[in-house]
Image (cartoon, rainbow, N blue to C red):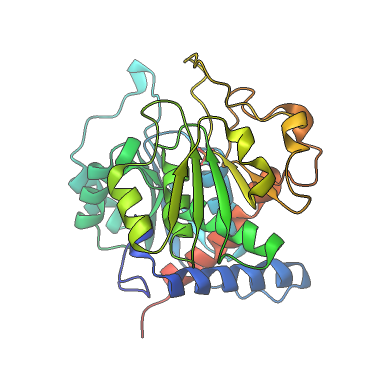
């Protein structure tokens, strides 16, 4: 089945600026009309398979909440940390895709390997939407990036001309998809502060610059705080000790503009954002995770609609 995206949504590069604007517009309408009971059940009679090869809290629950609100039904496949006695037989991913084709109209897929996710999509007739795939410089999380962009647009009223500090380990799916998504808008200025090798990949930097984005790298993120619109904390591996601090603390936040925003895709893995920042009105990461519901309702609506 084809939809406005062609078929699948695995990467931010599958989305044009007009695709992103369309989803954000739909999500905004959904968010504001939901409570008024004017929501159409665009997934009624549809079955969505949730195929998760690694764990999720936010993405899985918000997709399921979104599907329920649209009147659809979910089918669950999980192959996350089975105990030895419960391990499934290893099945070729292409077989799994063809089997699930017999049951589902759409697949929501999380897989730690980008190539396995692509192989699944290649053999699936049902459209596949990434729920976070890959690791490192090929990792993607497009619906997280859409949620992040929606949250910023809802608060600031724009996505053009923003200056964003990307802090922490940036070679992971949420930060990468966010940077690529923001680069679809006019003149983004990205200031990167990351440990050692954990920056954006060279190809991503080149792509963002070719779209008119400016990228700077800083050693001490505090230097950037007074001039940014957004602080996007991507998280830090709790098992690694770095010689630099990537922790955002309440005194740091006093350096920020009054209408700047602090985002984090969550989970917070250690004190990369101190708990006492949570009550600051600029800290909107829990609003951001809640916005996953209207955004994923918009994604499901568009992906389940045939392209006429
Ligand atoms: N932000 C995010 O992808 O969280 P989960 O891993 O809990 O889905």
Front residue (pair 144, 209):
209
Q: Position of residue 177 (x, y in %)?
A: 43, 50
Going 19% across and 55% down the picture, which residue do you hit?
123
The quadrant of the picture occupied by the C terminus is bottom left
On screen, residue 254 above or below 272: below
On screen, residue 129 above or below 184: above
**How many marks are shown on the rendered structure?**
0
**Does residue 149 appear in this view?**
yes
Front residue (pair 267, 87):
267
* Residue 135 quadrant: top left
**Does residue 135 appear in this view?**
no
Front residue (pair 290, 276):
276
Query: In screen coordinates, is 194 left or right of 148?
Result: left
Q: Position of residue 163 (x, y in %)?
A: 57, 54
* Residue 14 quadrant: bottom left
Q: Position of residue 118 (x, y in %)?
A: 24, 50
The quadrant of the picture occupied by the N terminus is bottom left
Going 40% across and 24% down the picture, which residue do you hit?
81
Q: Position of residue 242 (x, y in %)?
A: 49, 17
* Residue 207 quadrant: bottom left
On screen, residue 284 above or below 128: above
Residue that protrudes farthest toward the bottom in the picture: 308
Going 49% across and 50% down the picture, which residue do you hit?
190
Residue that protrudes farthest toward the front in the picture: 223
């Amino acid at each position: 089945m084809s939809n406005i995206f062609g078929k699948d949504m695995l990467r931010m590069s599958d989305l044009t600026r007009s695709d992103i604007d369309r989803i954000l517009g739909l999500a905004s309408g959904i968010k504001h009309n939901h409570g008024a009971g004017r929501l159409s059940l665009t997934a009624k009679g549809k079955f969505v398979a949730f195929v998760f090869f690694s764990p999720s809290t936010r993405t899985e629950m918000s997709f399921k909440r979104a599907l329920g609100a649209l009147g659809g039904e979910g089918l669950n496949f999980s192959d996350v940390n089975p105990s030895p006695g419960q391990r499934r037989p290893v099945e070729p991913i292409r077989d799994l895709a063809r089997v699930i084709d017999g049951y589902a109209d759409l697949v929501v897929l999380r897989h730690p390997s980008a190539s396995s996710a692509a192989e699944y999509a290649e053999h699936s007739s049902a459209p596949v939407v990434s729920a976070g795939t890959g690791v490192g410089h090929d990792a993607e999380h497009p619906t997280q990036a859409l949620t992040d962009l929606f949250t910023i647009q809802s608060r600031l009223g724009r996505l053009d001309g923003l200056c964003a500090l990307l802090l922490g380990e940036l070679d992971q799916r949420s930060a990468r998809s966010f940077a690529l998504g923001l680069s679809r808008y006019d003149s983004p200025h990205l200031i990167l502060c990351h440990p050692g090798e954990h920056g954006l990949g060279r190809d991503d930097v080149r792509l963002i610059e070719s779209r008119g984005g400016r990228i700077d790298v800083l050693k001490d993120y505090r230097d950037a705080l007074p001039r940014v619109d957004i602080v996007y904390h991507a998280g830090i591996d709790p098992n690694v000790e770095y010689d630099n601090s990537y922790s955002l603390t309440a005194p740091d936040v006093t350096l920020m503009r009054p209408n700047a925003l602090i985002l984090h895709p969550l989970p917070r893995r250690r004190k990369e954002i101190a708990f006492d920042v949570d009550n600051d009105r600029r800290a909107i990461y829990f609003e951001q995770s809640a916005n996953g519901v209207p955004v994923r309702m918009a994604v499901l609506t568009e992906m389940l609609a045939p392209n006429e």
